[in-house]
């Protein structure tokens, strides 16, 4: 009977501890993700400062301007000296550009994607606020409310989010990995801070919420 009681206690303890450990691991992954996003934000802002305020570009426009896309552009500001495609770059990619809650390992698939608004061109893009542009830090009137990076769904070479084309909350959900951390995912803002938010708190046209378009963010 005593042995049975001990086994019962152990079994009950196990059922309690497993969820607790799982919850702690998820919280740790979220904390690390937020820290990585802030590091990326620091790299982007430092780059922009060195470029007279000009923001880096994603695959959306980098090719047209013959410049690297934003992860390669900001790599030196993160202390990464390796060239893309090398083993050293692969290691750095997993350290900086991969959320720990994102179990993918393919370095052509990013955990984080750039808000495309910072490279839109009124001559080639259709967007709310045109012909206004937000190519420089100084042109972003509310940086603490304007999203810079977010957690995206797995798309090969998808280093940016075409959020200027969204018209519904579902469109945002389809592009974002909106529940990577439970009911939320993480967002980096143009002032360098990061937050865990539900997708509806970032984009909900029916409620007048749009933290993606710098002219509408409030």
Image (tube, grey):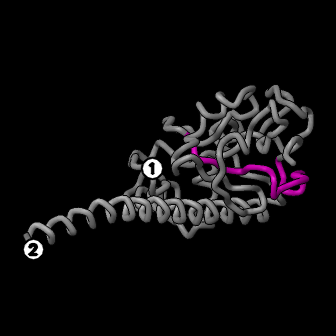
Q: Quadrant of residue 162?
A: top right
**Disc 1: which residue:** 102
Q: Kindly identify the residue that appears in the image at 69 percent across and 31 percent down.
A: 169
Question: Who comes first in sequence, dot 2 or dot 1?
Answer: 2
10 Å neighbourhood of mark 2: few (<14), some, or many (≥20)?
Answer: few
**What numbered label is drawn on residue 37?**
none
10 Å neighbourhood of mark 1: few (<14), some, or many (≥20)?
Answer: some
Residue 71 within the segment the image draws in magenta: no
- Please tell me whether residue 48 is drawn above or below residue 184 in the rendered image: below
Instruction: Quote the CA–CA distance across marks 2 and 1.
Output: 45 Å
**Disc 2: which residue:** 2
Percent of width and height locating residue 59:
62, 39
Percent of width and height locating residue 37:
61, 59
Percent of width and height locating residue 192:
73, 63
Percent of width and height locating residue 22:
38, 59
Q: Kindly identify the residue that appears in the image at 59 percent across and 61 percent down.
A: 34
Please state the total of marks drawn on the protein image: 2
Q: What kind of element bears circle 1?
A: loop
Which region is colored magenta? Answer: 135-152
Determine whether label 2 and label 1 are within 8 Å by CB: no
Q: Kindly identify the residue that appears in the image at 18 percent across and 64 percent down.
A: 8
Quarter occupied by the N terminus = bottom left
The residue nearer to you, when weighing 125 against 153, is 153
- Please tell me whether residue 87 is drawn above or below residue 167 in the rendered image: below
């Amino acid at each position: 009977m005593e042995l049975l009681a001990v086994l019962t206690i152990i079994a009950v303890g196990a059922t309690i501890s497993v969820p607790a450990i799982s919850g702690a691991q998820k919280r740790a992954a979220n904390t690390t993700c937020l820290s990585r996003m802030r590091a990326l934000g620091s790299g982007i802002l430092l780059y922009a400062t060195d470029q007279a305020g000009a923001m880096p570009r994603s695959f959306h426009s980098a090719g047209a301007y013959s410049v690297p896309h934003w992860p390669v552009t900001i790599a030196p500001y993160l202390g990464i000296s390796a060239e893309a495609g090398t083993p050293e770059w692969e290691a750095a990619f997993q350290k900086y550009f991969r959320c720990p809650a994102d179990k993918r390992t393919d370095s052509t698939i990013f955990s984080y994607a750039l808000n495309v608004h910072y490279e839109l061109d009124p001559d080639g893009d259709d967007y709310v606020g045109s012909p206004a542009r937000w190519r420089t830090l100084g042109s972003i009137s509310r940086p603490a409310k304007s999203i810079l990076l977010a957690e995206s769904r797995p798309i090969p070479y998808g280093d940016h989010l075409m959020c200027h084309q969204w018209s519904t909350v579902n469109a945002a959900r389809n592009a974002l990995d909106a529940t990577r951390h439970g009911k939320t995912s993480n967002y980096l803002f143009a002032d360098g801070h990061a937050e865990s938010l539900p997708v509806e708190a970032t984009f909900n046209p029916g409620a007048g919420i749009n933290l993606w378009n710098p002219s509408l963010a409030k």
